[in-house]
Amino acid sequence: MTTLLIEQGLVVTAAALVTVGVLMTATALWSRRVGRVAVVDITWGASFVVVAVVSALVGLALGVGDDLRRWLVPVLTGVWGLRLAWHIRGRAGAGEEDPRYAELLGDGGFGVAIRKVFLVQGFAVWLISLPVQASGVTSVRWWWLVVIGVLVWAVGLFFEVVGDRQLAAYRARPRESRPPVMDQGLWAWTRHPNYFGDACAWWGLWLAGGLAAGWLPGLLTLVAPVAMTHFIRNVTGARLLEKTMSQRTGWDDYAVRTPLFFPRPPRRS
């Protein structure tokens, strides 16, 4: 049974790897044409959706897995990934290059972008999507974990959607009439509700797509939510953004009373 599970896992991970390779190659060509590496951010969210659908089709072709969860996980992934891609389409698809990528690439050309951006993000998509891949070819052992996973995913989506809308409303206000730091709503509970929502959503997908299939699939896919949480909290997300945000007036007081990542009720400074 374990050998068969591993064989099925190798098939779906190989299919996912090929899928990600095609998507990142197309994105690299798109990036070269428009002169903006930041378009990879649009592909980032959409890639998980495509991998989820491919994984479900692989499981269907092999005749393994549970039909309900086989399509439930791609639906959850699709809502998360397509919302994210749509949300950042304007920022990533037009205008000046994203300062993060400009700093990362320096004076390097297209070859540096391939090595530092497209290969790295392609590998990250493949790695983080492991629970989604597993959901296509494994059977559910604990349905109650699928339910809990959906609930955790829903909490994450709530933080993302509401946090982004609150931030958009803040930015729409005239600069002279708004506070220098956004500290209302969910932003009073955590300095990065959207990043926390990302992490929460992927812990939910791991519960529903990985651990719900048993201890072995759960352990083999645990790296996915751990990696997502680590990178958006400590590397490419919250910490990187705070390098510029910390220069704003009132930021120090805001940072004292509001946690970096995991939310808690607001308190006085």
Image: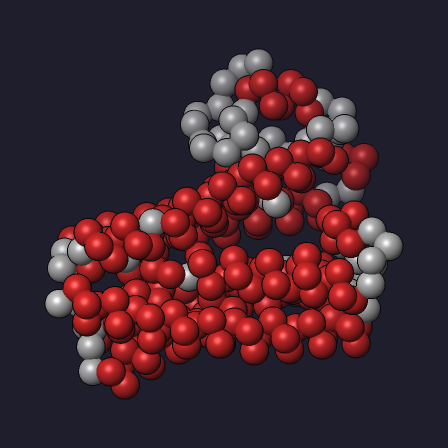
**Which quarter of the rendering shows the C terminus?**
top right
Q: Nearer the viewer, residue 236 or 161?
A: 236
Q: In this view, does 120 lie above or below 14?
A: above
Q: In this view, does 256 lie above or below 223?
A: above
Please name the residue shown 30% across and 65% down the image. 134
Please name the residue shown 81% across and 35% down the image. 176
Corner quadrant of residue 52: bottom left
Please name the residue shown 49% across and 76% down the image. 19
Where does residue 103 sit, x and y in percent of width and height?
79, 48
Apparent side of residue 38 relative to residue 95 in the rendered image (left or right): left
Please name the residue shown 27% across and 50% down the image. 219
Q: In this view, does 18 lie above or below 261?
A: below
Q: Nearer the viewer, residue 214 or 172?
A: 214
Apparent side of residue 209 relative to residue 82 in the rendered image (left or right): left
Corner quadrant of residue 72: bottom left
Where does residue 23 sit, x and y in percent of width and height?
57, 75
Corner quadrant of residue 117: bottom right
